[in-house]
Image: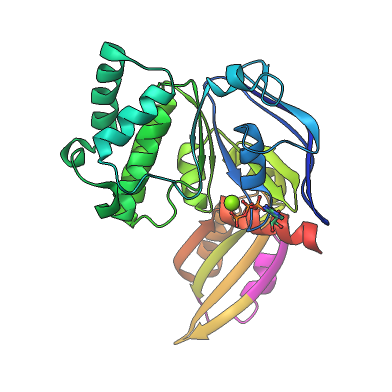
């Protein structure tokens, strides 16, 4: 659905996107992640035909977004970073106007408006002036605009920016529903969003793609170790020495000690779960354990690790 080859964008004195290539297959939900200024919006603006690349190509549904822009754009529903809406229109008028611009007429337009108002839960406010809408409802109208002509590809730039947690959750549910019928590219800062909803994540940093994997594969690939947290009580001062003899333990540290309980952090090779061995040692040595916990690394750890590695 999307095929990006060696795409670059230079603004005066600054490279915003630096020779990136990636594909998005039909039916995929792909998260576009990266710190501020990474080049997400620039890439999205090229993909949606708003600005030309300096070099490289982007095909949408097989059509070059620059040279066959009308054909390519027909495939795309785009919700930009700051949804531009006409303040002095009512929601219904605005959607009708946008539907007509996208070529819908008569019965088709009516049906589509009805379905889209429903899907975006804005039926109740269809008669309201856009200027009077809260941020969350504005976002939904922006979303309705992107969906009105049922394009196969949806591109959302930070769609949950400024929404409250319950609105974010309903957006996440809607995204999953939309994912059944559309290919989706979504840029976001909310890593949890990506972990919960995306099949694949592209990580962009300083204009370059530095990660392209499923959220869990990415965590596994990058993370070379994981952590076991242990709370243990024993008179024996050498328990840490005994534990550190277990094969695969990289580092063992006493984080703190209160009322006889030692809080110990154990770094092990990735995937080497030594909890059972520790429990056996505790049994043999009569140590008391009140917590042993395998700390899973999440996308946030991976993301930060990736970006720090690249910046160092
Ligand atoms: N019109 C412009 N003229 C000059 N430089 C620009 C322009 N738009 C963006 N840039 C620069 O290009 C780089 C990438 O910006 P971009 O908006 O694509 O980042 P982003 O990943 O979307 O960031 P954010 O998470 O803050 O939205 C930044 O250094 C930015 O300052
Ligand atoms: Mg941006």
Q: Please check the rendered image and state whether residue 248 is part of the magenta-colored stretch, yes or no.
A: yes
Could you say where residue 195 lies in the image, as x and y percent from the top left?
50, 44
Q: Is residue 106 above or below residue 43?
A: above
In the image, 50 versus 296, the foreground residue is 50
In the image, 258 versus 55, the foreground residue is 55
Q: Is residue 148 above or below residue 264?
A: above
Could you say where residue 281 lies in the image, as x and y percent from the top left?
58, 62
Q: Is residue 272 above or below residue 117?
A: below
Ligand 1 position by quadrant: bottom right
Q: Is residue 28 above or below residue 157?
A: above
User: Residue visible at 62% across and 37% down?
Assistant: 50
- Left or right of 254? Residue 101 is left
The reply to whether residue 201 is visible in this rendering is: yes
The reply to whether residue 148 is visible in this rendering is: no
**In the rendered structure, which segment of residues is drawn in magenta?**
233-253
- Left or right of 13? Residue 111 is left
User: Residue visible at 66% across and 15% down?
Assistant: 62
Determine the image quadrant of residue 250. bottom right
Q: Please check the rendered image and state whether residue 41 is part of the magenta-colored stretch, yes or no.
A: no
User: Residue visible at 67% across and 41% down?
Assistant: 43
Could you say where residue 279 lies in the image, as x and y percent from the top left?
52, 59
- Left or right of 263? Residue 179 is left
The quarter of the image holding the N terminus is top right
In the image, 230 versus 79, the foreground residue is 79
């Amino acid at each position: 659905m999307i095929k990006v080859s060696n795409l670059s964008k230079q603004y005066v004195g600054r490279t915003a996107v630096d020779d990136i290539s990636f594909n998005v297959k039909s039916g995929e939900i792909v998260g576009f992640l990266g710190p501020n200024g990474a080049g997400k919006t620039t890439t999205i603006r090229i993909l949606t035909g708003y600005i030309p690349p300096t070099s490289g190509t982007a095909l949408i549904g097989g059509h070059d977004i620059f040279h066959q822009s009308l054909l390519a754009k027909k495939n795309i529903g785009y919700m930009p970073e700051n949804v531009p809406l006409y303040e002095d229109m009512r929601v219904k008028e605005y959607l009708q106007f946008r539907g007509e611009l996208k070529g819908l007429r008569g019965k088709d337009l009516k049906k589509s408006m009805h379905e889209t108002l429903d899907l975006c839960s804005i039926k109740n406010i269809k008669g309201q002036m856009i200027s009077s809408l809260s941020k969350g409802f504005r976002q939904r109208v922006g979303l309705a605009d992107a969906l009105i002509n049922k394009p196969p590809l949806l591109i959302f730039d930070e769609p949950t920016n400024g929404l409250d947690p319950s609105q974010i959750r309903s957006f996440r549910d809607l995204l999953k529903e939309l994912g059944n019928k559309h290919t989706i590219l979504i840029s976001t800062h909310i890593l949890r969003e990506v972990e919960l909803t995306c099949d694949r994540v592209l990580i962009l940093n300083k204009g370059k793609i530095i990660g392209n994997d499923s959220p869990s594969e990415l965590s596994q690939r990058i993370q070379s170790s994981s952590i076991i947290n242990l709370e243990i009580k024993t008179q024996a001062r050498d328990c840490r020495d005994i534990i550190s003899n277990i094969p695969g333990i990289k580092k063992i540290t006493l984080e703190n000690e209160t009322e006889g309980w030692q809080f110990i952090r154990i770094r092990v090779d990735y995937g080497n779960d030594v909890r059972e061995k520790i429990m056996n040692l505790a049994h043999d040595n009569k140590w008391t354990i009140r917590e042993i916990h395998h700390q899973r690394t999440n996308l946030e750890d991976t993301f930060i690790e990736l970006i720090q590695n690249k910046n160092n």
